[in-house]
Amino acid sequence: MTVEDQVRDIVAKITRVDKSIITRQSTFKEIKADSLDVVQALVAVEETFGIEIPDEEAQKFQNFGDFVSYVESRVTQEEKV
Amino acid sequence: MSLQGKLALVTGSGRGIGRAIALKLASQGTNIIINYFRHRESAEQTAKDVESLGVKTEVIRANVGDPEKIDDMFDMVGNKFGCLDILINNAASGVGRPVADIDVKAWEWTMDINARALLLCAQRAAKLMEGRGGKIVSISSLGSRFVLPNYTVVGVSKAALEALTRYLAIELAPQNICVNTVAASAVETEALKFYFKEGLVEDSRQLTPAGRMVVPEDVANVVAFLCSEDAFMIRGQTVIIDGGTSVGLFALAGK
């Protein structure tokens, strides 16, 4: 399962939307994620991948794709270390 | 109890009120376990500042809204130190919404972090305080008894926190554990800037007979007193730190 699939599952579970509608271009609003959903998704992703996502980075995410790209970059970084 | 050489766990002590409490207790010789959840850099900065006061410090990441994470945190404290003298239940979160928009998720998130965490942390802390006594102090807010805009869930969670403080104070009294809460009006912190509109700082200043807003150090000073032996006979209380705002409301309204 790719990082993207795992993040999509997490977000879909929290926002209770069908994961098929979540694309990399989807905004959090389109996924019906409110601010609490976003925090919960961040926490769940942090725990799943063993990373920490600073709020300053999270605030830059414009859509689901930004979120996934950030997690991907962090996960690859950790693997290299 | 002199605070010298004691061990305190301060939840949510990377920033704001928790950080001020950690520094205040450290300045009196207390070793500090810093708990944080979302802001590692702030927690590490607090740890540095605490260490520069000549005491030992440890940083633990844990979401106090998650019972398993609370258990993990206290397992770590137990394994590393084997005891605890002071628990400061400070970590808080909340969803600022009008009543109509509060859903189950927002309710549970807020209640779990702000109210249930005290129960679970106090249960574990009491075990680490066995045979030595201890102090448990929580941070509430005026929203527990006064209505603030979009503050329903947080206000209710803080009311639960204050009620729980009374029950804990009585049930833990035989173990020589003093349990109290402090409730502050709006305190100048980053959380405040995040949750409330601009202008609140100025509004609060005008509503405060003491002439300025409450700052984190005001809260930390009272918390440190409640952790001292001088406060031994204060049990189950909520001490209000608001510069007179709550008792002065009617007088201010007449101005």
Image (spheres, coloured by chain):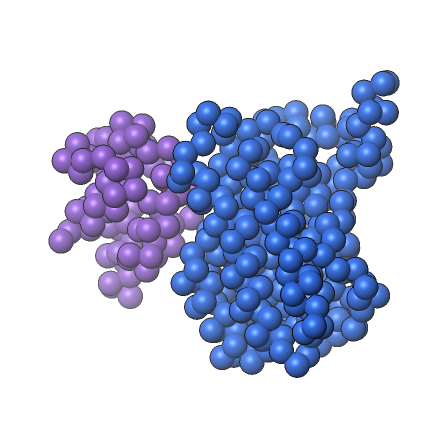
Chain colours: A purple, B blue
Residue beneath the point at 66% across and 42% down: B141
Quadrant of the drawing holding the N terminus of chain B = bottom right
Is residue A46 found left or right of B9 in the rendered image?
left
Where residue B15 appears, as percent x and y from the top left, is 59, 51
Is residue B140 found left or right of A60 in the rendered image?
right
Residue beneath the point at 79% across and 60% down: B234
Question: Is there any visible trace of residue B221 in the rendered image?
Answer: yes
Residue beneath the point at 33% across and 33% down: A33
Q: Is residue A79 above or below residue B148?
A: below
Where residue A61 appears, as percent x and y from the top left, is 34, 37
> In front here: B90 or B106?
B106
Quadrant of the drawing holding the C terminus of chain B = top right
Where residue B38 appears, as percent x and y from the top left, is 46, 51
Q: Is residue A4 above or below residue B76?
A: above
Question: Is there any visible trace of residue B136 in the rendered image?
Answer: no
Residue reaching furthest top? B255
Q: Quadrant of residue B166?
A: bottom right
Q: Is residue A65 above or below residue B233?
A: above
Q: Quadrant of residue B84?
A: bottom right
Residue beneath the point at 68% across and 33% down: B146
Where residue A53 appears, as percent x and y from the top left, is 38, 50
> In front here: B90 or B201?
B90
